[in-house]
Image (cartoon, rainbow, N blue to C red):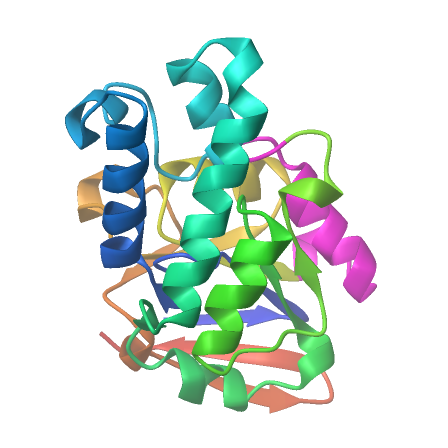
Amino acid sequence: MRISAEALLFDSDETLVSTLRSVVRCWTQWAADYGMTLEDVKKVEVHGRPAAAIVADLLPAEQVAEAVARLENAEVADAKAGGVTLVTGASEFLAALPPTRWAVVTSGTRRVAEARLSQVGIQPQCLVTVEDVTHHKPHPEPFLLAAERLGVDPSLCVVFEDAPAGLTSARAAGMRTVALTTTHAVGALDADAVVADFNDISAHVSNRGVELVITH
């Protein structure tokens, strides 16, 4: 399968950076600090949503700001301590792309995203975080903003995501999608193509853009 694009937009967690163990460590301790368990946290929708939205579903409004700050500090510290790794093939895939033709679009905060990405050697010129938008995924605003910052028509962008909320966001933005099965089964991922990781994809860059070849 071949897909042509002018720009590629990537989610961060579990798309470029494997963060699941870090997330479990940080959220488990955070939940204990507030008299909950990780299972209590999972009773609300968690994946692909900003931490602030999750916390707001779990705690009284007056506790949310302090609780979010505590979680963010823990996630930054865990990342800097080596708690995250690359998704298979991500580094090599990004290395084939001109830096002006790709962006990272995450529902996380800038502090957490930069800590995790820098830990695995990823330094995007364009990074869109939850602080940059009014509406987070599954709203299309995050991906539309990334396309605008890259100067590319949304219809000429391809989004790489692992979460249904992110794929919904990308489709609403009029973009094509590639889903990775790092967190969800194939049946839960509505995308133009579904792959296990970046070893299933190659990128060929020309003056006309980027041609993706999906080999699995």
- Which of 34/68 is in front? 34
Q: Is residue 55 above or below residue 21?
A: above
Q: Can see residue 91?
A: yes
Residue at point 49%, 50% (across, down): 73
Quadrant containing the N terminus is bottom left
**Percent position (x, y) of residue 80?**
43, 70
* Residue at the extreme front of the image, as rendered: 33
The answer to which image quadrant residue 200 occupies is: bottom left
**Percent position (x, y) of residue 53?**
50, 25
Q: Is residue 131 above or below residue 19?
A: above
Q: Is residue 165 part of the magenta span, yes or no?
A: no
Q: Residues in magenta?
A: 136-156
Residue at point 43%, 79% (across, down): 120
**Percent position (x, y) of residue 103?**
64, 66
Report the predominant secondary structure element of the magenta stretch.
Answer: helix
Q: Is residue 6 left or right of residue 159?
A: right
Q: Is residue 55 above or below residue 2?
A: above
Q: Is residue 5 left or right of residue 125?
A: left
Q: Is residue 142 left or right of residue 74?
A: right
Q: Is residue 141 part of the magenta span, yes or no?
A: yes
Q: How many dots with numbers?
A: 0
Q: Is residue 37 above or below residue 141?
A: above
